[in-house]
Image (tube, rainbow, N blue to C red):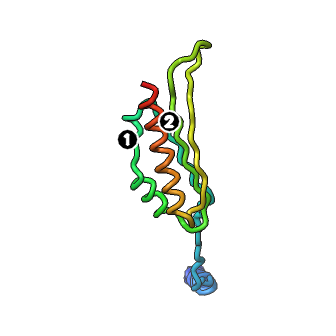
Amino acid sequence: MKNVITSLVLLMTALGFSQTTIKEEAEITRTVSVENVDVAITVDSAEEIESTFTIDDIKELLDLSSDNEMVSFKIVCRGDYMSNGKKSSMSYKVEGNSNNRDDFLKSVEKIRTSAIKYYNNKN
């Protein structure tokens, strides 16, 4: 019995010391990259345009994006039903690069103003 216990203790000691410990921890890195930022808004009235977004909202979105990303902004203006029963619509779209933020924001302001004019002239 004494030999069995001694053998088990030696076996457990040998197994305990024979296991290697990894001192280097594996480092897992994840990189998230955004290549395109597309924003599309569908509205039914000028009031919706004014309440849905401002240029500051788009500026904030551009501030969150990284450099040299393709960005686009689209407004879809839905109109009245046509004679064929389908709903009419018109859209404005601007595309640019996040490196040219000022030009892109000016273009967004122009299409926002044009979309508001579309609804104001329709009435």
- Amino acid type, mark 1: Glu
Query: In front: 122, or 98?
Result: 122
From what the image shows, is residue 69 above or below residue 109?
below
Q: Are marks 1 and 2 in contact (CB under 8 Å)?
A: no
The residue singled out by tag 1 in the image is 50
Q: Position of residue 38 (x, y in %)?
A: 57, 50
Residue 7 visible here = no
Q: Quadrant of residue 32?
A: bottom right
Q: Residue furthest front?
A: 121
The residue singled out by tag 2 in the image is 42
Q: Position of residue 120 (x, y in %)?
A: 41, 31
**Quadrant the N terminus occupies:** bottom right
Q: Earlier in the sequence, mark 1 or mark 2?
A: 2
In three-dimensional space, the C-alpha distance between marks 1 and 2, rounded to whole angstroms, equals: 12 Å
Q: Position of residue 72 (x, y in %)?
A: 58, 51
Residue drawn at x 63%, y 85% is 18
**Quadrant the C terminus occupies:** top left
Q: Position of residue 99 (x, y in %)?
A: 57, 67
Q: Quadrant of residue 86?
A: top right
Position of residue 63 in the picture relative to residue 66 (left or right) = left
- Amino acid type, mark 2: Thr
Residue 96 visible here = yes
From what the image shows, is residue 123 above or below residue 107?
above
Residue drawn at x 39%, y 49% is 54
